[in-house]
C-alpha cells in the first residue's frame, strides 16, 4: 500500500476547472516531483492535500487513513507538513522558536504550566530545545538559533521552513518550489539537504519545482501537470524524454 | 548557545521586575521622607491600574497582534463584579484581607469569562473591523452596567434593568448596584503596595506566557496565520486563550481601581472608549510587544500632566510635544538605527 494515494481529485473555482481528475500514488521513502507550466494547478494540489481547499470530488488517503476534507490542523497531525512558495516564517520570532513552534503538538504542557513555569515547564522546554537544536544542526542553522527569522538570508529562510515542517514529525513532506530564487550553488546544496532529509528522517517527499536540474537530479518519479490534468506520470528519465511533455512544458 | 539565549530573556525579565521594585522602593522612601504631596500619593494607585491595563492590552496588541479598543470594558467588569461582591459581603465577611483576595479572583475570572465569550464572535474579525467591534462591546458593557439594578435580601439576589422599585425587595434588602449611581459605600482597600504586587503578578503572567508553548503558538499566529495552521496550531483556540487572559488581567486592574474608590460609577470618564484609547497610547508609545516600555510609557504619561502643573496653560502643549518625541524615538527608522548603534557599542564594551 502506497503512503499517499490520491484518486479522482477535482476542484473548480467558478468556471475554472483548476484540478481535473488528479491521481497519484507515492510509495514510502520516495522522492516524487510535481512539475508543469505556470497555472497548471500544482500549488492548488498542495492546498488540496493540506486541507486549505476542500476538494469537490476525490479521495486522499495517507498511510491507509482517509484524510479527504479534513482541516489543515488535523491533516498536519495525521502526518503531512509543507513549505510555501512564498516563504512563510514567523518573522518576529527567533530561529529556534520557529522550530519549537513546529514541535507544538509533540512536546506538550498545559496553559497553567505556561503561566506558572512549574518544574515540568523546564523539563519539557529542555527536551524541546535539544530536539530543535538537533534539527537546526542538520540544516546548518544552529549558529543562527538566536537571531530573528526575518534577519536570515534568503536561502537559510528556505531551510528554516523545511526544518520547521520537519519538527512536526510528518510522514510526508511537501516542498513548494524549494529552489525558487536560489543560485546554482545554493540549489546544489539544497539537493544534498533534501536527499539527506529523505535518508536520515526516513521521509517521503513530494516537491513542486521548476528547476529541471534539481528535478532530474533528485526525483525518482514525476507527474507532469498541464491545465489541471495529468499529462504524464512515471520514472523521471522516461517522463522528461516524452515528446508530449517536451512540447507542453520544456519547449522544443 | 541555547543556555545563553535562555539567560538573555531571563535577564531582561529580571531587569523589568527589578525596575518595578526599585520604583516601588524609591516611592516608599519619598513617602517616608514626606517628599510626596498628597495629590501625588493619590495618583499612585490609579497609576498602578493604568500600568496593569497597559500590560494587559499589550498582550492583545503586541503578542496576539490584534487591536482591541474595548479593554476599559473588561476593566469595568472586573471593577463592578468585585465591588458588588465586596458590597454584598461587607457585613458578613469580616476578614477584609481575604475578602479583597476573593474579590480579586472574582473580578479576574468574570472579566476573563467575558473576554472568552466576546472573543468567540469577535476574534473571527481582523484588524480595523476587530478594533471597532471591541470598541462597541466595551461601550455596551459600560452602558448595561449603567442601567443595572441589583439588590440582595432574605430571598436572594434581584436583578432589574428598569429601576429600584421593580426589584421588589423585602424591607430588609440592601442595594448593591443602583443603576447610574453605581456602587456606593465600599471600603477603600487598594494601596500602593497592593498595586505594585498586582503589577508584578501581571508581569509574571505575561512574561511567562510569552516564553512558553502557548505564547509561541500565539505569536506564531500573529506572525503568519497560514503557516501556524500548517504546523498544526489551532488558531481559534489560542486566540481565545490570549484574549481571555488579557481580559482577566484587565479585570485585575478593574478590581484595584474599584477598591480605590468609595463610589464606583460607570461613567465615560472611567470606562469609556477614551480610556481604552489611552491604554492603547501607552502600548504604542512604549513599543508594541515591549512590556517594559508599556510600564515606562504609562508612568511618564501619567505623571507628566502633574509635573507640568507649574506651566499652567502650556501644560497640554508640553504633553503633546512629549508624546510626539516619544513616538519619534521609538519608531522613527533613523532613531532606531541610532539607538541600535549606541546599544551595540555598549554591548561590545560589556563583552
Image (tube, rainbow, N blue to C red):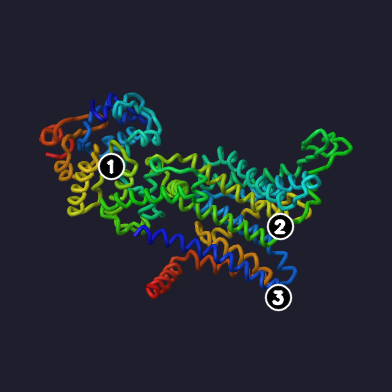
Q: Which mark is residue A176?
A: 1
Give the letter of the chain under mark 3.
Answer: B
Image coordinates of residue A104 in percent, x first then y, are: 40, 43
Q: Residue furthest right?
A: B171
The residue sitting at 87% across, 35% down in the picture is B170
Q: Which mark is residue B33?
A: 3
Give the letter of the chain under mark 2.
Answer: B
Determine the image quadrant of residue A106.
top left
Q: Residue under circle 2?
A: B190
CA gap between label 2 and label 1 equals 58 Å
Is the N terminus of chain A in the top left, top right, bottom left or bottom right quadrant? Answer: top left
Between circles 1 and 3, the one closer to the viewer is 3
CA gap between label 2 and label 3 equals 22 Å
Image coordinates of residue B82 in percent, x first then y, are: 71, 47
Relative vertical location of residue A17 with respect to residue B139 in this rendering, above or below: above
Relative vertical location of residue B171 with respect to residue B299 in this rendering, above or below: above
Give the letter of the chain under mark 1.
Answer: A
Horizontal side, residue B18 vs residue A51: left or right: right
Tell which of A230 and A172 is nearer to you: A172
Disc 3 is placed on an element classified as loop
Disc 2 is placed on an element classified as loop
Instruction: Judge whether residue B182 can be spotted in this image.
Output: no
CA gap between label 1 and label 3 equals 68 Å
Disc 2 with disc 3 on a shared chain? yes
Q: First in sequence: mark 2 or mark 3? A: 3
Tell which of B52 and B125 is nearer to you: B52
Horizontal side, residue A105 vs residue B61: left or right: left
Amino acid at each position: 500500500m502506497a503512503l499517499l494515494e490520491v484518486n479522482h481529485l477535482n476542484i473548480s473555482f467558478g468556471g475554472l476547472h483548476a484540478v481535473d481528475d488528479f491521481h497519484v500514488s507515492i510509495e514510502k521513502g520516495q522522492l516524487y516531483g510535481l512539475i508543469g507550466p505556470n497555472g497548471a494547478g500544482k500549488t492548488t494540489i498542495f492546498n488540496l492535500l493540506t486541507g486549505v481547499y476542500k476538494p469537490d470530488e476525490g479521495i486522499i488517503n495517507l498511510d491507509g487513513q482517509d484524510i479527504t476534507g479534513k482541516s489543515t490542523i488535523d491533516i498536519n497531525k495525521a502526518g503531512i507538513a509543507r513549505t510555501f512558495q512564498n516563504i512563510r516564517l514567523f518573522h518576529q520570532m527567533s530561529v529556534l522558536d520557529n522550530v519549537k513552534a513546529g514541535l507544538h503538538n509533540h512536546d506538550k504542557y498545559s496553559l497553567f504550566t505556561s503561566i506558572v513555569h512549574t518544574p515540568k515547564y523546564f523539563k519539557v522546554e529542555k527536551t524541546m530545545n535539544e530536539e530543535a537544536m538537533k534539527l537546526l544542526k542538520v540544516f546548518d542553522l544552529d549558529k543562527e538559533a538566536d537571531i530573528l527569522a526575518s534577519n536570515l538570508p534568503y536561502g537559510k529562510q528556505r531551510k528554516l521552513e523545511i526544518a520547521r515542517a520537519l519538527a512536526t514529525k510528518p510522514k510526508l513532506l511537501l516542498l513548494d518550489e524549494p529552489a525558487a530564487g536560489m543560485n546554482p550553488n545554493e540549489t546544489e546544496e539544497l539537493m544534498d539537504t533534501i536527499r539527506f532529509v529523505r535518508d536520515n528522517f526516513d521521509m517521503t517527499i513530494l516537491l513542486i519545482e521548476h528547476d529541471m536540474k534539481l528535478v532530474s537530479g533528485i526525483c525518482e518519479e514525476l507527474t507532469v501537470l498541464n491545465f489541471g490534468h495529468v499529462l504524464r506520470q512515471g520514472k523521471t528519465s522516461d517522463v522528461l524524454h516524452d515528446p508530449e511533455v517536451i512540447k507542453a512544458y520544456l519547449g522544443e | 548557545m541555547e543556555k545563553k539565549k535562555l539567560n538573555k530573556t531571563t535577564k531582561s525579565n529580571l531587569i523589568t521586575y527589578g525596575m518595578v521594585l526599585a520604583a516601588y522602593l524609591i516611592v516608599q522612601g519619598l513617602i517616608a521622607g514626606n517628599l510626596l504631596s498628597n495629590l501625588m500619593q493619590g495618583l499612585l494607585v490609579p497609576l498602578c491600574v493604568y500600568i496593569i491595563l497597559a500590560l494587559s492590552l499589550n498582550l492583545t496588541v503586541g503578542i496576539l497582534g490584534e487591536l482591541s479598543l474595548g479593554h476599559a470594558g473588561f476593566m469595568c467588569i472586573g471593577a463592578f463584579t468585585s465591588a458588588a461582591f465586596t458590597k454584598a459581603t461587607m457585613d458578613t465577611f469580616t476578614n477584609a484581607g481575604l475578602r479583597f483576595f476573593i474579590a480579586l479572583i472574582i473580578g479576574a475570572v468574570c472579566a476573563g469569562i467575558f473576554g472568552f465569550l466576546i472573543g468567540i464572535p469577535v476574534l473571527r474579525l481582523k484588524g480595523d473591523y476587530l478594533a471597532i467591534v471591541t470598541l462597541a462591546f466595551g461601550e455596551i458593557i459600560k452602558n448595561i452596567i449603567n442601567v443595572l439594578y441589583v439588590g440582595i435580601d432574605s430571598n436572594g439576589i434581584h436583578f432589574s434593568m428598569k429601576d429600584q422599585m421593580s426589584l421588589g425587595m423585602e424591607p430588609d434588602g440592601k442595594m448593591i448596584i443602583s443603576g447610574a449611581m453605581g456602587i456606593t459605600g465600599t471600603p477603600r482597600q487598594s494601596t500602593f503596595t497592593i498595586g505594585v504586587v498586582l503589577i508584578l503578578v501581571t508581569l509574571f503572567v505575561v512574561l511567562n506566557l510569552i516564553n512558553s508553548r502557548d505564547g509561541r503558538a500565539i505569536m506564531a499566529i500573529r506572525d503568519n496565520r497560514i503557516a501556524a495552521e500548517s504546523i498544526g496550531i489551532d488558531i481559534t483556540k489560542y486566540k481565545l486563550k490570549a484574549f481571555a487572559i488579557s481580559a482577566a488581567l484587565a479585570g485585575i486592574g478593574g478590581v484595584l481601581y474599584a477598591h480605590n474608590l468609595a463610589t464606583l460609577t460607570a461613567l465615560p470618564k472611567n470606562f469609556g472608549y477614551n480610556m481604552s484609547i489611552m491604554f492603547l497610547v501607552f502600548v504604542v508609545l512604549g513599543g508594541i510587544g515591549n512590556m517594559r516600555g508599556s510600564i515606562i510609557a504609562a508612568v511618564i504619561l501619567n505623571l507628566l500632566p502633574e509635573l507640568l502643573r507649574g506651566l499652567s496653560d502650556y501644560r497640554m502643549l508640553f504633553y503633546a510635544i512629549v508624546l510626539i518625541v516619544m513616538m519619534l524615538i521609538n519608531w522613527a527608522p533613523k532613531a532606531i538605527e541610532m539607538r541600535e548603534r549606541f546599544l551595540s557599542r555598549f554591548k561590545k564594551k560589556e563583552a
